[in-house]
Image (spheres, grey):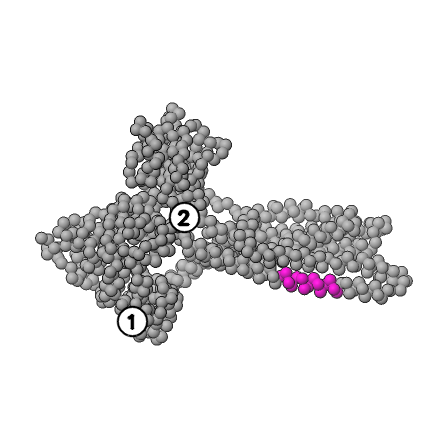
Amino acid sequence: MSHPKVITRDLAADRLSPLFSRIPESENALASLPVDLDQQLQFTSVGGLVLTERRLLAQEADGQLREWPLEEGIALRQHDHAGVGCLELVDGQARLAHWRFTLVQGMPSRSFISAYEQAQARLAGKALSFEDDLNPCPRCGAPLPPEGTDADDCPACQTRQVSPPSTWVLLRLWRFAHPYRLQLLGGFLLTLASTAATLVPPYLTIPLMDEVLIPFQNGKQIDSGLVLLLLGGLLGSALLAWVLNWARTYLLALVSERIGADLRTTTYEHLLTLSLDYFGGKRTGDLMARIGSETDRINVFLSLHALDFATDVLMIGMTAVILFSINPWLALVTLLPLPFIGWLIHIVRDRLRTGFEKIDRVWSEVTNVLADTIPGIRVVKAFAQEAREAKRFKDVNTHNLEVNDRLNRTWSLFTPTVALLTEIGLLVVWAFGIWQVSRSEITVGVLTAFIAYIGRFYTRLDSMSRIVSFTQKAAAGAKRIFDILDHASNVPDPAQPVPVPKVQGRIELKSLSFRYGSRSVIRELDLDIRPGEMIGLVGHSGSGKSTLVNLICRFYDATDGAIRLDGIDIRRFAVADYRQHIGLVLQEPFLFFGTIAENIAYGRPDATREQVVAAARAAHAHDFILRLPHGYDSLVGERGQGLSGGERQRISIARALLIDPRILILDEATSAVDAETEGEIQKALDNLVQGRTTIAIAHRLSTLRKADRLVVMDRGRIVEVGPHDELMAREGAYWRLYEAQARNVDTDPQIPRLPEMPSAHAAKP
């Protein structure tokens, strides 16, 4: 059995020093866990837990210090939702305390829980079995993968089905409806008035039958004035109902469109705030379907079906009141099918609820195939895989058809059953009404009015039953939307961001570590980059170069350690403010559909044409841009279609030049071009790096010949740092990389020799 490792005062414990100061020398600290979010889900550099042999100590984000003894019955539990983890201390009756953290702390928190349970068991004099030492999942109790594996979540939890959406999730849409509450109130009043107007005509049939038609059939003269009055009432109520229905439909349609637009905008804005790891686990087609079709479905539900449902409820309620006021016994017979219809709706609703969400997931598979194939159509055609992609689309489309067919079998049985019950109810009313007429308990006019009201009553009842499917579709869509909105970024803004000062460009990496799940990628890395210095990152693939750049850009947050810009931890800056000072040139430049000028000015939309041209000149892109049919106003296809790789790269360099960043990141900026194009790009890069702190990644070592220092990485660590000549003289890791690349150049006639690089012998003193 493994025991918790005793934790001494190290860099991870700096933020928990108030807790360690309360531990006497006779008491050992067994484990510590920094907590990086406060209760408002804002990033904090204060707070965490320390476990000793006898107690649990906690420092809250507000600085408050608390402690609990390791007593039996007090347990630590962990759960996570929407990208935010929560650690709870419970005693079986209530929650004593809880702490929140980003999921980069997921594995450390589980290890902390395991250490807590072992310490608790030892204090109670219990022996731990082998199963107890397997680090069980705090959510389901299943053993978690051992430390050091690539898995970062409980396999048992991952295989569980996602809980079906509840209809109550639609109530969360009130957040978006609240700004339009006055318009919604007006729409409700119009609905009430229009419903009341539609209930007037059946009531007027009572005097029309009993005082006009039946007396005329018995030989009496027709009262023309009464007939005109009753017919005028029927016409007036119809016109009034039409005007009120038009007004409420138009008003609520406007409101629902605005609610849908706000929902789409809010979801998209929130999506843009999420960190890169969220997008790494999602398909483009799925996210497009959520923001597009799901919000459209909710919009249709709000504008049509929710309005119809409110009208149906009002119609049924008001009709029931009128029926009971006319004849209570006949009204009771009329309402007889209601319990059976309600029971049917309850049974079918659960099946529809799970069915519609499954349909949404399957439909997202269809859109995912489209999102994969259409942008990659050149690769599809280049490898002659049209038939394969057509089959893949056919398979997912067939799966979508099968899922819909299964749901339609349930729905197709439900609707006719409701119609049958309503017809039976109408038959019962006829029979009971005729019996009452025969006993002179009601008149023919009353029975006629009842039949008219019942027709409207059962029509609305049938309409309400049909709304069940639309409601469940909207609930499924709302759940998928709120899954995005509930997801918190793993790179949160601080509660009180520090203004970014005038950036000098000094970057300090202190004991930096980072893990993808349980896989360690960066390990205890220290590096000090001076303002204006150019650093070249070299190393084998997988050595951690790109991950290090991602951490500096704050696409991810470090698991341990810190990155400081001019002496200030970058996590204290607002993310957007910090990134405004970073220029990024990627190996595969991404250009948006639009003009050349718009792509260059993407980072500075307010830039003048003169500034755009100046940036293009500095990037050595001006000449080829002028050769295009419309110059700077030439349209660039999606992802830069129509331009060569070197042309796209020079436009991306011009884009970086235009924002004039103090920090420049070059990630394999010349690796995908030929030697001649590389020369053009290198000239542009020479202009770009002047006066800027530059971090360049390159496999082709010749592109780093002007770097002030080369940083050699291997397995997440820095193994060598220094200028080219010095590293070559050492004959270490860099020398081996250089020699291996030189040998490849010598043996491959298609690859030009490395220019302007001194030989290994010349580099030696």
**Quadrant hosting residue 687:** bottom left
Image point (45%, 29%), residue name: 73
Task: Say which of 399 and 317 sits in front.
Answer: 317
Expressed as whole percent of the image width and height from the top left, the position of residue 104 reads: 37, 44
Instruction: Please check the rendered image and state whether residue 247 is part of the magenta-colored stretch, yes or no.
Output: yes
Q: Residue type at mark 1?
A: His
Residue sitting at x 69%, y 58%? 193
Give me the disc on residue 622.
Answer: 1
Q: Is residue 172 left or right of residue 442?
A: left
Decide which of 438, 640 is in the foreground and name it.
640
Q: Position of residue 474 (x, y in %)?
A: 55, 53
Q: Is 9 rendered above or below residue 692?
A: above
Q: Position of residue 27 (x, y in %)?
A: 32, 28
Q: Tally the marks.
A: 2
User: Residues in magenta?
Assistant: 235-249
* Residue tagged 2: 495
Q: Which residue is painted at 86% across and 64% down in the image?
A: 223
Q: Is residue 321 left or right of residue 701?
A: right
Quadrant where the N terminus is found in the figure: top left
Instruction: Look at the image and tell me whether residue 389 can be seen.
Output: no
Q: Secondary structure at mark 1?
A: helix
Query: Of label 2 and label 1, which has the lower sequence position?
Result: 2
Identify the residue at image location x=28%, y=52%: 566
Point out residue 322 in the picture as x, y percentages from the top left corner.
75, 52
Residue 199 seen in the current view: yes
Quarter residue 595 falls in: bottom left
